[in-house]
Amino acid sequence: QVQLVESGGGLVQTGGSLRLSCAASGTIFRINFMRWYRQAPGKERVLVATVTDTGLTNYADSVKGRFTISRDNAKNTVYLQINNLRPEDTAVYYCNADIQTGITSRDYWGQGTQVTVSS
């Protein structure tokens, strides 16, 4: 059974920084894409950043230049470095990964970590 566990959220002031982590555990053969999503109060969950198994990255326009996604394949962990935080970054941040445990792969989700930015 595969689990994704996020950590690193919290309450920060505008302009501050946070580093989110998401560790995958269980019987894992391969992790393909790893992603971060966020869901602000009353809004839909949106994709923030993606990193492939080879380290290629992609970002939503709203976070380019402030967010950095990275991964440590040896630890089955993905990170999201968030700099220059703004109140509009307040949301629950979810980790998502396409994980192969056997012949096929499927999406897994973490439980989410709250990021709150005060003005």
Image: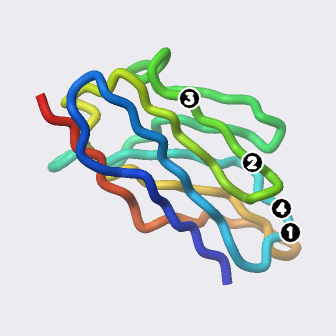
Q: Name the residue under label 3.
A: 68
Residue lying at 38% horizontally and 31% vertically, measured from the top left = 17
Q: Which of marks 2 and 4 is nearer the N terminus?
A: 4
Estimate the spatial distance between the alpha carbons at disc 3 and disc 4, rounded to whole Å: 22 Å
Which type of secondary structure does the marked residue at label 2 adopt?
strand
Q: How crowded is mark 4: few (under 14 residues within 10 Å), some or many (20 or more)?
A: some
Question: Which amino acid type corresponds to the residue marked 3 in the rendered image?
Answer: Thr
Estimate the spatial distance between the alpha carbons at disc 2 and disc 1, rounded to whole Å: 15 Å
Which type of secondary structure does the marked residue at label 4 adopt?
strand
Which type of secondary structure does the marked residue at label 3 adopt?
strand
Q: Mark 1 points at which residue?
A: 29
Question: Which amino acid type corresponds to the residue marked 4 in the rendered image?
Answer: Arg
Estimate the spatial distance between the alpha carbons at disc 3 and disc 2, rounded to whole Å: 13 Å
Which type of secondary structure does the marked residue at label 1 adopt?
loop
Q: Residues within 10 Å of mark 2 (few under 14, many from 20)?
A: few
| Residue 118, position as x, y percentages in the image | 14, 35
Question: Which amino acid type corresponds to the residue marked 1 in the rendered image?
Answer: Phe
Q: Mark 2 points at which residue?
A: 72
Residue that sits furthest to the top in the current view = 65
